[in-house]
Image (cartoon, rainbow, N blue to C red):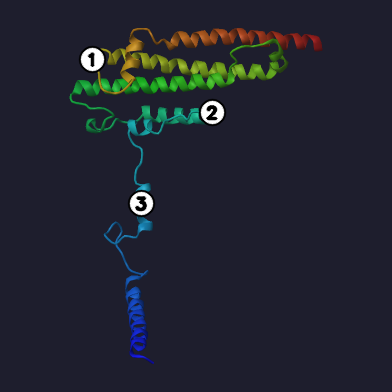
Amino acid sequence: MTSSRILFIFCIIFFGTFAHIHSEVDLDYNYEYEKNGPYMKFSDWIPYKLHKWEPRNLEDFYELVGLKQHFGENELRRDIYFLKIALQKKFRHPRNALCKIESEEEYYKYRNLLFMHLNLRIMRSYMRLASLYDKRHLYFYNLDFAEDLNSSFQIAEGFYKEAVPYWEKAREHADTANEIPFDLDIGTIETERFEIVTGKLNYGYIIEDHLERLSKKQKTVRDELARRESEDK
C-alpha cells in the first residue's frame, strides 16, 4: 500500500471523527433557554409574535373592516359587527391617529369625522343587506313566488329602517366637524363631510325612496296573496 493511499485513509478517519464530534456539540436539542431571550427557539417566536396584537381602539376595529369585490351577507354582517364595536371604543393617542394631528381642534375634528364615517359605513352595509332581499323590478311572473317575496320584502324593509338612525348620526357629526374651518389629510372622508353638509349626499332621501318603492311592491304581493286566498275559498 502506497504512502499516499495510507495518508488518504487517515484523513478520512480523522476528519470524519472530528465532524461527528463537532456536530454532536452543536446539535443540542435539549438545551435550556429563556423566553424572549437571545437563544429562544424559532418555533416559539412565531406564535408569540402572531398573537401579540389585540384590537383595542376605535381605529383598530375600523382597520378590520373591508369588503371583497364579491361579498355576501356574511361579509356585510361582519363589517357591521366590527364597526359597531369601534363606535364604543376609545380613540388612539393623537400621535397614532390615522392622519397627522397637530392641535386639539384638529383632534376634535378628527374624532367627529371618524364617527361620521363609521356611521356611514354601517348605514351603507344595512342598505346593501336590504338590497339582497329587495327586487329592483317586480314582473308579473315573479308573483308565482308571492309568499317568498312577501317574507323577503319584510326583511328588506327592516334593514332599510335600521339604516336611518345611522344616517342621522352621520349627518350630525358631519355638521359638527364642518365647524372647524380647515381640512385634515384623511383621504375621502373630508369629501364625504363636504357632500353631506352641502346636500349633495342625502341618504335620507335615498332610503325614503327605497321604502316607497318597496311599499308599492309589497302591496302588489299582498294583493296577489289575497286574490289566491279568495279563490281558494
User: In the rendered structure, which disc, 2 or 1, sits on the residue that comes first in sequence?
Assistant: 2
Residue type of the residue flagged with mark 3: Tyr
Is 174 on the left-hand or right-hand side of 83? left
Mark whose residue sits in front, 2 or 1? 2
How far apart are the alpha carbons under marks 1 and 3? 44 Å
On the image, numbered disc 2 is attached to which residue?
A: 72
Residue at left offset 36%, top offset 21%: 117
Residue at left offset 34%, top offset 7%: 198
Residue at left offset 73%, top offset 16%: 144
Asked if the residue under mark 1 is in contact with the one under mark 2, i.e. CB atoms within 8 Å, the reply is no
Count residues near mark 3 (Cα–Cα under 10 Å), then give few for <14, some for 14-19, many for 20+: few
Asked if the residue under mark 3 is in contact with the one under mark 1, i.e. CB atoms within 8 Å, the reply is no
How far apart are the alpha carbons under marks 2 and 3? 33 Å
Q: Which mark is residue 158?
A: none
Location of residue 214 with respect to 87 vertically, above or below: above
Count residues near mark 2 (Cα–Cα under 10 Å), then give few for <14, some for 14-19, many for 20+: few
Q: Which mark is residue 180?
A: 1
Q: Residue 179, position in %: x, y?
A: 25, 12
User: In the rendered structure, which disc, 2 or 3, sits on the residue that comes first in sequence?
Assistant: 3
Asked if the residue under mark 3 is in contact with the one under mark 2, i.e. CB atoms within 8 Å, the reply is no
Residue at left offset 31%, top offset 18%: 190
Q: Residue 142, position in %: x, y?
A: 69, 15
Residue 101, quarter of picture: top left
Location of residue 114 with respect to 230 vertically, above or below: below
Residue type of the residue flagged with mark 1: Ile
Q: Secondary structure at mark 3?
A: helix
Residue type of the residue flagged with mark 2: Gly
Count residues near mark 1 (Cα–Cα under 10 Å), then give few for <14, some for 14-19, many for 20+: few
Residue 91, quarter of picture: top left
Q: Which mark is residue 48?
A: 3
Q: Quadrant of the N terminus?
A: bottom left
